[in-house]
Amino acid sequence: MITFSEKQLKIPSMSRPVFLVTGGMSKFDRAIPEKKTEELVIDAFTEAARFIGKTPAELKQYIHSAYYGHFADHFGDQLLGEAVIHDRLGLDPLGNVGIKTGGATGGSTLWEAFKTVASGYSDCVLAMGWERMDEVPTDEGNHYIASAADKDWETPLGHIYTGYYAVMAQKYWQVFGKSEDSFRVTMAEIAVKNRGYARMNPHAQGPKKITVDDVLSSPVVAYPLRALDCCLMSVGAACAILCDEKTAYELTDNPLLVYVAAGSHTLRVADRRNMAIPLLPNETAEQYKDLGERFPGGDRYPGFTGFLAARMAAYYGYRMAGVTDPTEDLDLVELHDAFTISDIQTYEDIGIRPYGEGRTYVESGDCYHTNPHTGKPGKLPANLSGGLLGNMHAVGATGIMQAIEVAQHIWGRWAEMHADPKKWEAFGRQKPEDWTDLQVKGARRGLAISHAGVGSHVTATIIVHPDHQLERRF
Amino acid sequence: MRCTEDRGTVKVINGRYRPTGKFHYIYEHSPIFDENGKLMGITNPRDVTHIHAYGGEAQFFESLGKGKLLGTRCDNPHCEAEGSIFMPFRIHCPDCLAKNTVVDLTETARKSATVHTFMITERTGAFNTLPTPIKFVNVEFEGVCTILMGYLSVGEPEIGMRVVPIFKTQNPTFTILDLSWVPAGTKEADLPEGFTFG
Ligand SMILES: [Zn+2]
């Protein structure tokens, strides 16, 4: 059993608070042959500047250092693409650095930007992420993604990353889902929900009005996962501006507090010794004593059924921000729904539900904007952006997109950023007749989870309105 | 077109790589036009051979072709993980970073390997050389603290199923693909070409 030292489990501290001032994003699509990456990045930056009534040139005057999330050099066929983007944004000679942590690259970029401001090194930083996954055909793309697995021990096995994750899905499906038809339906409901929310998002690549039956009759990718259980592969960019308090209030009247924490776990699944479940503030060791009895095969931790990295990101992040119970303390979340089943696994890793009970977050209706059982607002709406299933997964941009989506609700400006017919037109997209305002009324606090592969890296970004800070009790 | 003519190979002589043959092939770019003949971009063809060191894992990959499955064990008496056996083969203990002791796990695998989880997929990425559908199996062993990923060559996988290792002892590739798994009780005649029980 692996044990951790107190030093390793220290709650991260900051020299000063960090504020999210603005953010923006480009259109997301499977292919954008008419634009170079730098054009998408400038689209995102321009949206961020406009959001606080600045020109790009005015906003640039505040930036002191830049953090660039771009995962796959292979995809862009450009080593050090960060330097190209930094030049095109006209931010030389400021210091900049590239960040790559697989699917969590966007979240990790925020993490680096956050620490830079928290330390006092910079008063205002740019966190910009992008990915260009359209410049190789899909099977070469799958090989490139699989290159992020262990190249001697895993990649030669099919060159298909989905397969390395899918074995985790199978274990969760059999142990915690008990291979029940009702669990399969719950998975499908996530696919229906997130693609449905994507219909209200002009940026989104994969909006779809579908039913549970559509999901259940879509082609099997790797049983029990079907095509509509799996996320998109995208092109696009997203950015955020983080500042210290003084600079934040120079730029806007309404900055939001932001906390970012990160965890990791071995690239190869279950390739470390077992350990006790690290507990979140709303859990006790007692409640997991009989986990293996209730779910035979479910007591090996972290094993194949959970993501230790997500657990650790929440472990540090909740205590930094004063979150005791995510379902009570948060008003919305954006989760890394790469697959419907990994979404359910994540509910447990981050304590929205205890291990083994993730499905009830969907089945209770809590995860919806409007609870389908009661017609009342969902207790903790998830992935109103459409998530990775319906909006996008432009890897380096994903974690930043999630954070901006959460923030737009807390700013009370979600509708403004999603309803504008001019934006729909500019992206060449048809605004649906039944477009619905998904603004979470009175949103004060939210969370975004950015996640890599089989759980090698995960970040938790917690965004809090300064008038609604939680007391730190840890 | 398949450019394997004079494809590069490498030897290590006196501690240095000695490459011979061609490590890249040059192709013309080709323009990308839209349906109206407007230039949109360019293709960048590339064909490169990389060199890769196995270092302390070389004995693992070499042993597969000889029908042996090697793991490692931490024997550091001061380590929390002392006595832990690792498969995949770890050169160093992940806890104390001491050099692990190499242990032969072939018999352990024959006697105790079971499928911890699995997945069957028709989908592969470019450069895949395994027949489809691929049946991924993650295999656990008695007394080993980690789980090994591999593929099943015969039958249909199930969680808890007893499996035994098979090895590509004829024309080994010296990659992880030289190790595969079959249900316990499978006959030698049913193994894929080039594979034996070791
Ligand atoms: Zn050790």
Image: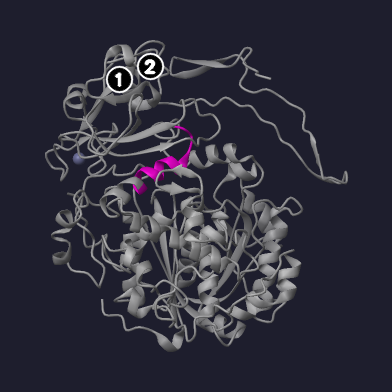
Where A229 falls versus A48 (above or below)? above
Q: Mark 1 lies on which chain?
A: B
Determine which residue is flagged by label 2.
Answer: B192
The span shown in magenta is: A158-169
Q: Give, as a three-letter code, the residue at label 2.
A: Pro
Res. A365 image quadrant:
bottom left
In the image, is residue A456 part of the stretch drawn in magenta?
Answer: no
Whichever of callouts 2 and 1 sits on the residue coming sooner in the sequence is 1
Q: Decide: marks 2, 1 in contact (CB < 8 A)?
A: yes
Where is residue A318 drawn, in percent x and y? 33, 72
Left or right of B61? Residue A432 is right
Q: Which of B175 and B127 is in front in this view?
A: B127
Provide the major secondary structure of the magenta segment.
helix
Determine which residue is flagged by label 1.
Answer: B166
User: For the residue carrying disc 2, how many other residues have a C-alpha within 10 Å: few (<14), some (14-19), or many (20+)?
Assistant: some
* Quadrant of picture, ligand 1: top left
Q: How far apart are marks 2 and 1 (CA)?
A: 9 Å
Res. A411 image quadrant:
bottom right
Q: Which residue is drawn at 53% across and 84% down?
A: A246
Where A347 falls versus A272 (above or below)? below
